Image: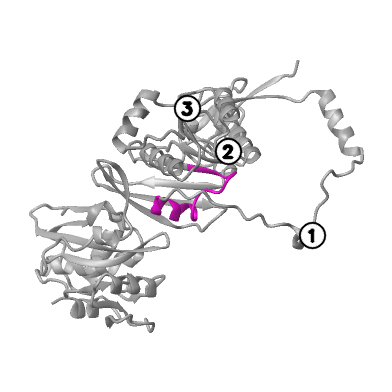
């Protein structure tokens, strides 16, 4: 009998420890080590491996020149959900495996059930396996989404052997499994959701998808930090990794592709959660601007990048006097440390006195803005709120603010200006170094924060 080795593996970095400890020495994460068992090789097995390595063999499939490798023209399976197809590169590729992760309540099951309905209407057979909900619960959601089609086959299984048997029996064009962390494979140590179980189950499903030329979508859980739960090898096994995010207090949902072997990485799909499910939002920029009355102090507009997509968004600041020794600094949807830096720059470089005022800043619509391109719009909103002077009407602000108060260019400025012109804005405030196309906008340039406040405030 082979000896059984027991060890602990970190689900974040993959580091192996001889015994369980609470703190991973590799990635310094807490509570990420899980127990695994592995049969140690016997002496005869080792000798057999050495003998096999020493015995010459004839390759069954010789290597080819890269010029002679045939390029298969994969026909994508288009769902018809515009934003979903955009993110995965134009549709699902037969034989590919996609992993969709997101927080509970983000809408993963809703979106994939709608995609299954759309695929069935297009002529594909879909096997939807729910390992978390009963068939009755899924049917109730399908009634609400009007996602009832005879080509959508529904099953509730938690044993991977049964899932593979269903695949063999029905031979679907598309498989949806919700979720990979709740199925288990007999003979593999650990409970469902453990590192070993997730790795082996995912490997078996990837092999089944490739062998049957079946497009597969797996749903994955996320940790409290927003990372996909389970071992990192899970992300390496699949072809596409997508993340569905959104504030549960807002209707907006964003689907991002962080890995895609069959399409571009960085695409973002925008959805709005409504009573009938997830609705594609093609012109998402209009969700974040236009609701504030013109002439209101403390409001500025910028153009942020979500993946490869430019979105016009509104930044708001409220500045009020305070009697507290330590004034409040509150940021919603913006980086709090970046806010503190910009407040210091305004005090020191532009003489905007804020040390005795509470400051509250927010992005509109639940969109999280963390890139430096938002700096100039936030600076204008803060000064506008402090001095009660509105920002110049119809203008967007684009630029990074340095510690010396200088303005710096940001990535893809021309794409941002093009989106601003499409949205109907008339002008833009930019760093003086920009010398590109104006796209019909009146460009106002400034070298530093002081000059930007003079040009940008009415």
Q: Which of 422 and 3 is in front in this view?
A: 422
Say which of 169 and 457 sits in front: 169
Task: Please tell me whether mark 1 or mark 2 is closer to you in this view.
Answer: 1
Viewport quadrant of the C terminus: bottom left
Q: How many marks?
A: 3
The answer to which of marks 2 and 3 sits earlier in the sequence is: 2
Kindly state the secondary structure of the residue where label 3 is placed: helix
First-in-chain label (3 vs 1): 1
Whole-percent x, y for residue 286 in the image? 25, 61
What's the image's color scheme?
A: one colour
Is 315 placed above or below 380 here?
above
Circle 1 residue: 65
Residue 7 locus on image (x, y percent)? 61, 26
Q: Residues in magenta?
A: 81-99
- The image's mark for residue 182 is 3
Mark with earlier residue (1, 2): 2
- Give the residue displayed 92% in from the left and 41% down from the top: 56
Residue 40 vs 84, above or below: the answer is: above
- Dot 3: few (<14), some (14–19), or many (≥20) neighbours within 10 Å? many
Label 2, secondary structure: give it: loop
Whether residue 344 is visible to the viewer of this picture, yes or no, is: no
The x, y position of residue 363, in whole percent, is 24, 57
| Percent of width and height locating residue 184 | 54, 24
Outermost residue to the bottom: 435
Q: Which of marks 3 and 1 is in front?
A: 1
Q: Is residue 362 shown to the viewer in this render? A: yes
Question: Cβ–Cβ below 8 Å for labels 1 and 2?
Answer: no
Alpha-carbon distance for marks 2 and 3? 21 Å
Give the Cα distance between marks 3 and 1: 43 Å
Q: Quadrant of the N terminus?
A: top right
Q: Mark 2 points at which residue?
A: 14
């Amino acid at each position: 009998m082979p000896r059984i080795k027991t060890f602990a593996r970190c689900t974040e970095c993959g580091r192996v420890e001889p015994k369980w400890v609470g703190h991973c020495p590799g990635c310094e994460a807490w509570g990420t080590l899980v127990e695994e068992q592995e049969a140690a090789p016997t002496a005869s097995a080792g000798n057999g491996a050495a003998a096999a390595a020493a015995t010459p063999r004839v390759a069954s499939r010789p290597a080819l020149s890269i010029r002679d490798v045939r390029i298969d023209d994969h026909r994508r399976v288009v769902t018809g959900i515009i934003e979903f197809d955009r993110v995965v590169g134009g549709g699902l590729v037969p034989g590919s495996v996609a992993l969709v992760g997101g927080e509970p309540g983000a809408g993963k099951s809703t979106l994939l059930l709608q995609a299954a309905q759309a695929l069935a209407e297009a002529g594909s057979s879909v096997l939807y396996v729910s390992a978390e909900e009963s068939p009755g619960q899924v049917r109730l959601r399908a009634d609400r989404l009007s996602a009832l089609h005879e080509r959508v086959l529904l099953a509730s299984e938690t044993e991977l052997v049964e899932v593979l048997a269903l695949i063999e029996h029905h031979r679907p064009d598309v498989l949806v499994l919700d979720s990979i962390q709740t199925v288990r494979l007999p003979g593999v140590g650990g409970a469902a959701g453990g590192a070993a179980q997730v790795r082996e189950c995912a490997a078996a499903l990837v092999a089944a998808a490739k062998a049957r030329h079946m497009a597969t979508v797996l749903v994955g859980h996320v940790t409290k930090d927003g990372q996909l739960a389970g071992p990192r090898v899970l992300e390496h096994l699949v072809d596409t990794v997508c993340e569905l995010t959104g504030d549960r207090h807002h209707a907006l949902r964003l689907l991002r592709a962080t890995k895609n072997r069959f399409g571009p990485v960085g695409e973002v799909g925008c959805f709005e959660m409504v009573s009938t499910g997830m609705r594609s939002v093609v012109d998402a920029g209009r969700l974040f601007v236009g609701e504030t009355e013109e002439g209101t102090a403390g409001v500025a507009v910028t153009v942020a990048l979500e993946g490869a997509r430019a979105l016009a968004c509104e930044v708001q600041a409220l500045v009020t006097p305070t009697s507290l020794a330590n004034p409040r600094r509150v940021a919603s949807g913006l980086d709090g440390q970046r806010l503190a830096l910009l407040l210091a720059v305004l005090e020191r470089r532009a003489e905007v006195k804020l040390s005795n005022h509470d400051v509250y800043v927010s992005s509109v619509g639940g969109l999280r803005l963390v890139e430096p391109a938002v700096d100039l719009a936030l600076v204008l909103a803060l000064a506008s709120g402090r001095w009660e002077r509105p920002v110049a009407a119809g203008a967007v602000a684009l630029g990074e603010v340095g510690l010396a108060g200088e303005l710096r260019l940001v990535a893809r400025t021309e794409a941002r200006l093009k989106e601003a012109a499409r949205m109907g804005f008339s002008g833009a405030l930019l760093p003086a170094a920009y010398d590109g196309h104006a796209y019909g906008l009146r460009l106002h340039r400034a070298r530093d924060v002081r000059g930007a406040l003079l040009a940008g405030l009415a």
